[in-house]
Image (cartoon, rainbow, N blue to C red):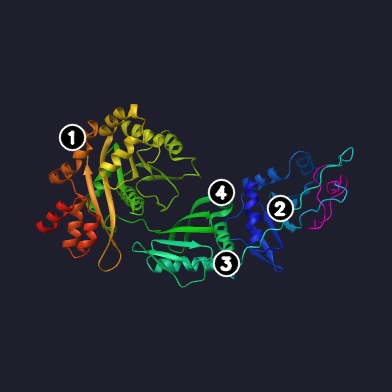
């Protein structure tokens, strides 16, 4: 019962005396006699029906359909709950109360259960009342072995803000005000933010496991909590004020942790990101593959967003994006944009990309090209008349190309090189480097696929690519070292910082001196 288990865990963590779940309404907790709506969307009829399907099976479902009400019990770990289900005009209403774990009978027989009434409605459920699991059996059940005594679970430390999403939101807004790119939360440790690539500890109260679990439930919903408990990690996105966040929650040796990437809700432009303005020419192609490469945290996804935003403002195209998760929301303009999130709208990048080919797209945006199936479908899509934009984790154009080729088995790599040489339009690699005044500046390597570059790809001679990039200014080539030298000459970046990011120091030094 993964779906309802997540809500029951939140109820236990927050020490609630009861929880009410009604179709079409936000679940409500009762704590200290007061009703507290949970910070999550209303429960839709399909999810409530899923709860019912898990709780009432076999004869119990028949009893619910006949009488319109039912009482059941269930356990999540060491916590036990009594759940009264009632059919209403809007759907269903579930009243959940915590109970003690059942004790084994002295004779070894299982605890007795009351048979459901068949001629009159049941009394109002209470936590102490035994549950009717099925109609009156024709004969008593045979003796069974004593049920094991479940040891009580150690209570999780609960701070004053364990149930307060307001405190969590205030922490996010504080991180945003400090222009942090990330907020890292670990149970028992002070929060940390990443500013200009460096971690800074905040003078704030350390969150508890209960805090983090409640915040995941509040902003990720029951599905995120269920995935976290089942898989040990979960991804989701949400908005706080003017900030949109990409979140990853995960269990680790000391408990629970939450990594948040802070985004802005306004779609950025190429100029606002400090990228060359002519980068927008990459989306003028009718078909082909454009790769955005760079190390983790270099802003590859944000660059994709800026390119899609420019396309949205300037061209009437049908764009389908596959994201994990959705970060920026594109408002309709000249383009028709359908944004799909992996896990919610598609099971994987490959499945989403395969489906997108049947959805009459002009442009396909793939959050990350990382597995052989996704790469193969992306190349086929580019080959069959679609413009495909995707990101790759690589330090340069050569590494990005090799990463795609290496995804194929050895006996297919020659064909893959030929296919990639035919469809690749450009590789843009970006690095973020600290500036003198604080913040980070972007350094770009741009490699359009000329006839010479395509030949290098087909002939497996990528070791010569760097020379072509350095000597191909007339073809639109921009070496990373030249971009770094420009930042040094303009006084934005320290010489030592730029040299640390350069791949070819001799060429970088010549570019700095050339002016």
SS type, badge 1? helix
Across and down, in percent, residue 121 comes to 84, 50
| Marks 4 and 3, the one that precedes in the sequence | 3
The residues tagged by marks 1 and 2 sit, at their Cα atoms, a distance apart of: 67 Å
Across and down, in percent, residue 501 comes to 25, 55
Taking the view exactly as shown, the residue that stands out farthest to the right is: 139
| Marks 1 and 4, the one that precedes in the sequence | 4
Label 2, residues with CA under 10 Å away: few <14, some 14-19, many ≥20? many
The residues tagged by marks 3 and 1 sit, at their Cα atoms, a distance apart of: 59 Å
Mark number for residue 131? none
Q: Is residue 155 magenta?
A: no
Q: Is residue 327 depicted above or below 406 in this figure? A: below
Q: Mark 3 sits on what residue? A: 164
| Pointers 4 and 3 in contact (C-beta within 8 Å) | no
Q: Residue at x 28, y 54 (%)?
A: 431
Q: Depth check: 316 or 188 in front? A: 188
| Marks 3 and 1, the one that precedes in the sequence | 3
| Marks 4 and 2, the one that precedes in the sequence | 2
Mark number for residue 451? 1
Q: Mark 4 sits on what residue? A: 227
The residues tagged by marks 4 and 2 sit, at their Cα atoms, a distance apart of: 24 Å
Label 1, residues with CA under 10 Å away: few <14, some 14-19, many ≥20? few
Question: In the shown orientation, is residue 106 left or right of residue 286?
Answer: right
Point out the stretch of residues depicted in magenta. Answer: 109-134
Q: Depth check: 377 or 471 in front? A: 471
Q: Mark 2 sits on what residue? A: 93
Across and down, in percent, residue 229 comes to 58, 51
The chief SS type of the magenta part is loop
Q: Residue at x 44, y 47 (%)?
A: 324
| Pointers 3 and 1 in contact (C-beta within 8 Å) | no
């Amino acid at each position: 019962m993964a779906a309802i288990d997540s809500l029951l865990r939140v109820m236990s963590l927050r020490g609630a005396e009861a929880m009410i779940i009604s179709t079409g309404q936000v679940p409500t907790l009762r704590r200290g006699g007061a009703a507290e709506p949970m910070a999550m969307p209303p429960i839709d009829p399909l999810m409530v029906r899923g709860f019912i399907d898990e709780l009432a099976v076999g004869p119990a479902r028949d009893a619910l359909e006949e009488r319109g009400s039912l009482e059941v019990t269930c356990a999540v770990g060491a916590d036990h709950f009594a759940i009264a289900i009632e059919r209403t005009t809007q759907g269903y209403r579930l009243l959940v109360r915590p109970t003690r774990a059942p004790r084994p009978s002295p004779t070894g027989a299982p605890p007795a259960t009351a048979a459901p009434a068949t001629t009159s409605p049941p009394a109002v459920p209470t936590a102490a009342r035994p549950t009717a699991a099925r109609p009156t059996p024709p004969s008593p059940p045979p003796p069974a072995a004593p049920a094991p005594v479940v040891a009580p679970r150690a209570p999780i430390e609960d701070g004053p803000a364990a149930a307060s999403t307001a405190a969590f939101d205030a922490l996010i807004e504080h991180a945003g005000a400090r222009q942090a790119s990330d907020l890292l939360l670990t149970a028992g440790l002070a929060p940390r933010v990443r500013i200009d690539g460096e971690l800074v500890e905040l003078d704030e109260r350390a969150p508890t496991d209960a805090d983090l679990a409640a915040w995941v439930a509040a902003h990720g919903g029951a599905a995120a909590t269920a995935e976290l408990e089942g898989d040990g990690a979960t991804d989701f996105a949400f908005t706080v004020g003017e900030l949109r966040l990409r979140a990853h929650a995960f269990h680790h040796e000391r408990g629970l942790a939450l990594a948040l990437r802070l985004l802005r809700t306004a779609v950025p432009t190429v100029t606002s990101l400090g990228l060359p303005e002519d980068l927008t020419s990459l989306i003028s192609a009718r078909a082909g593959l454009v790769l955005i490469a760079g190390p983790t945290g270099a802003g590859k996804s944000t660059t994709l967003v800026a390119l899609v935003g420019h396309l949205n403002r300037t061209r009437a195209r049908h764009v389908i994006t596959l994201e994990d998760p959705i970060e920026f929301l594109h408002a309709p303009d000249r383009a028709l944009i359908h944004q799909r999130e992996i896990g919610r709208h598609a099971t994987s990048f490959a499945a989403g990309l395969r489906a997108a080919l049947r959805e009459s797209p002009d442009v396909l945006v793939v959050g990350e090209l990382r597995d052989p199936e996704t790469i193969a479908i992306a190349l086929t899509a580019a080959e069959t008349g679609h413009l495909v934009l995707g990101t790759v984790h690589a330090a340069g154009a050569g590494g990005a190309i090799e990463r795609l080729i290496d995804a194929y088995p050895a006996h297919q790599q020659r064909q893959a090189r030929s296919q990639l040489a035919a469809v690749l339009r450009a590789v843009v690699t970006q690095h973020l480097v600290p500036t003198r005044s604080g913040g980070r500046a972007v350094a770009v390597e741009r490699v359009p696929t000329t006839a010479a570059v395509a030949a290098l790809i087909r002939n497996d001679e990528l070791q010569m690519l760097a020379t072509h990039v350095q000597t191909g200014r007339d073809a639109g080539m921009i070496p990373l070292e030249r971009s770094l030298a420009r930042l040094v000459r303009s006084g934005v970046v320290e010489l030592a910082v730029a040299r640390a990011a350069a791949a070819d120091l001799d060429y970088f030094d010549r570019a700095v001196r050339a002016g």
